[in-house]
Amino acid sequence: MEKSDNPSDHLVNPANPLFLHPGENPALVLVTPLLADNNYQQWKHDMIVALETKNKEKFVLGTLAYPPSTDPLHDAWKRCNKMVMSWLTRSMTPSIKQSVMWMDTAADIWCDLLECFSHGDKFRIVDLQEELQICKQGDSTVSQYYTHLKILWKELTMYRTLLVCTCSSPCNCGLILKIKKERDDDCVIKFLRGLNDEFSQVRSQIMLMEPMPNLVKSFSLVLQQERELNGSFSHNSQESVANINFQDNSNKNSFTNRGGFSNSRGRGRSNRSAGRNNKYCDHCQRTNHTSETCWIKHGLPVGYKNSFKNNSSSSKPSASIAESESSIVTEPSVVESDKPSAQFGFSKDQYQTILALLSQSQKASPPVTSVHQCTVNSSGSVPSSFSWILDSGATDHICPFKSAFKTLKPISPISIRLPN
């Protein structure tokens, strides 16, 4: 400790460890998080930094000797020591604070903490090495992954510091610098190996560099690659959204142009009904068509049997399974005749065969209105609002609509099986 003829000079000199600023507070917490069982090395590092900013680290390191009671600076040293002790205990958890609160000097507290928490360093070193070994980027960004690795490396470095030559005549071979370079290269390799596969190209380029760049430079190169990938992904996403919107608009236009039928399999019911419900026929007083296309007024095309001349003025069914009002053919669908129907799955030849059989059946027997009506659209498409019932020769049918039956008879509950 420096000697001075006037003790008051030490108390007003900010460069002297015995100087206390009037704004210093013994209840101040210098370090957070508080000292616990598993963060001693980090707490120790942060506490030394905080004490050095206040020029009080000599009190915990023991380099500022305790003056005798006859020394004029005895009271000043004692006051500074108590201030440092208060800072130390305020930065501990209550359980650790209880074990050191009865000590006399800040150096005693510091040495006791070192003795208590330094013996478990070997186990912590093993844990850190295992964490570094299994650490991968995964779902984290490059910056988050780099920060996590940096924390682990810094903590491991505090336990495993580089040894410095203490010989009276230090060697000039530069071995310490080579060891430090190898340790830095190991950090770079571990950082690169833990990256995701999309960084394989920049990873290979960095690994082939001679000399290998340091960790900060490698992180900068990988970060640039990540920004490029994110920019390309964002651009591709915008193009994909634009293509989807364009295709959606094209499908809507095609749907409207084809009279309510979309290009895909199935029917667009909402668009179909929206485009047809505004039509009304003045002749038959029905909807979904106009008088210009009314088959009741102008007659059915060749090959179709007029099954609603007798019941055009009445909506009641004339057979056990008859046509409801919504099932009357209103408009012929215009589709190319050489295309097979996607609705029934029949080819053109099959349709021709069915028509021939129906023609022979009509010539052999007089028309009967009480039997199941059958009509087939040979154009390869089903009219938009007609429910087709194919006369397969079966005697029993299943219908979900009660209004389609002329007579009904209640029966006991039975099990219903699907027809063949």
Image: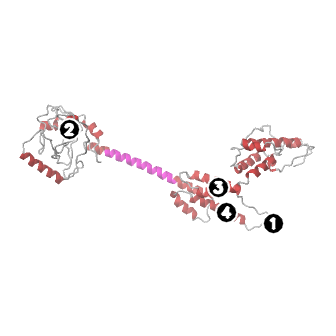
Q: Label 2: few (<14), some or many (≥20) within 10 Å?
A: some
Callout 3 touching callout 1 (CB < 8 Å): no
Query: Which comes sooner in the sequence, label 1 or label 2?
Result: 1
Q: CA distance from mark 1 to mark 2?
A: 109 Å
Residue type, numbered disc 1: Ser
Residue type, numbered disc 3: Asp
Towards the viewer: 403 or 56: 403
User: Is residue 42 inside the magenta stretch?
Assistant: no
**What residue is at 14 percent from the left and 35 percent from the top?**
318
Q: CA distance from mark 4 to mark 3?
A: 24 Å
Q: Secondary structure at mark 2?
A: helix
Query: Which comes sooner in the sequence, label 3 or label 1?
Result: 3
Q: CA distance from mark 4 to mark 1?
A: 23 Å
Residue type, numbered disc 4: Lys
| Residue at the disc numbered 3 | 127
Camera-side mark, 1 or 2: 2
Query: Which comes sooner in the sequence, label 2 or label 3?
Result: 3
Q: Label 4: few (<14), some or many (≥20) within 10 Å?
A: some
What span is in magenta? 228-251
**What residue is at 79 percent from the left and 50 percent from the top?**
111
The secondary structure that most of the magenta stretch takes on is: helix
Q: CA distance from mark 2 to mark 4?
A: 87 Å
Residue 55 position in % (x across, y down): 79, 46
**What residue is at 19 percent from the left and 40 percent from the top?**
331
- Residue 169 bears which disc, if any? 1
Query: Which comes sooner in the sequence, label 4 or label 3?
Result: 3
Q: CA distance from mark 3 to mark 1?
A: 38 Å
| Residue at the disc numbered 4 | 181
Q: What is the quadrant of residue 321 in the picture?
A: top left
Towards the viewer: 402 or 226: 402
**What residue is at 43 percent from the left and 48 percent from the top?**
238
Camera-side mark, 3 or 1: 3
